[in-house]
Amino acid sequence: MATEIRRLIFSHSETTTAIRNYGTSLGMKFPEGRVIRARYAGNAEYEFHSMKQFKAPIQGDYNVRETPKAITLTFFDEKTFEQKFINLTADFISAALIEYSIQNKIMMPKNAEKNLDLTEFNV
């Protein structure tokens, strides 16, 4: 049987918007500026992460595969030329991007398995 693979690629500006909107709804604050880099952090960053136990309802509703990894986001503030770093769980970022997709009417099959992957320029 044929297998369909679909990939949604989010730019760093879309990722910034998704994370800010989703985090704000949970009362979180983020550094000023925009995301310029996303990379997987080491195992220790995940093992000791305070959000490790956080599970958004949307993860179950949209069949998101749990990813036991932390991701370090680099924010760049163009006003001060500062770079600031924040660690988030991959599951938090997945939930933020799904919420972003729903709000922006990006079609996504609800029952299909979803995975998060990082490239140098996109999420």
Image (tube, rainbow, N blue to C red):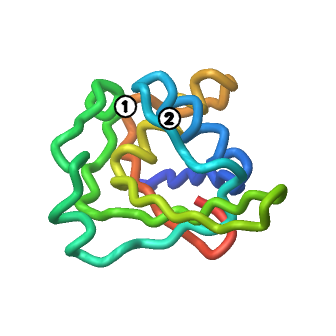
Q: Which mark is residue 92?
A: none
Please tell me whether mark 1 sits on a helix, a strand or a loop. Answer: loop
The residue tagged 1 is 62
Residue type for callout 1: Tyr
Quarter-of-image position of residue 64: top left
Residue 95 at x, y percent in the picture: 42, 37
- Asked if residue 117 lies left or right of residue 47, the reply is right
Left/right of residue 80 with respect to residue 40 in the rendered view: right
Specify few, some or many for label 1: CA neighbours under 10 Å numbering under 14, 14-19, or 20 or more: some
Which residue is denoted by mark 2 in the rendering?
A: 98
Instruction: Place residue 119 in its image quadrant.
Output: bottom right
Identify residue type, mark 2.
Answer: Ile
| Residue in front for this viewpoint, 88 or 63 | 88
Residue at the spot 50% in from the left edge and 51% down from the top edge: 4
Q: Is residue 38 above or below residue 35?
A: below
- Above or below, 69 against 33 in this view is below
Q: Position of residue 50 (x, y in %)?
A: 21, 49
- For the point 66% across and 39% down, the residue is 17
Tell me if mark 2 has few (under 14), some (14-19) or many (20+) residues whose alpha carbon lies within 10 angstroms of its own: many
Residue 42 location, x and y as percent? Answer: 30, 78
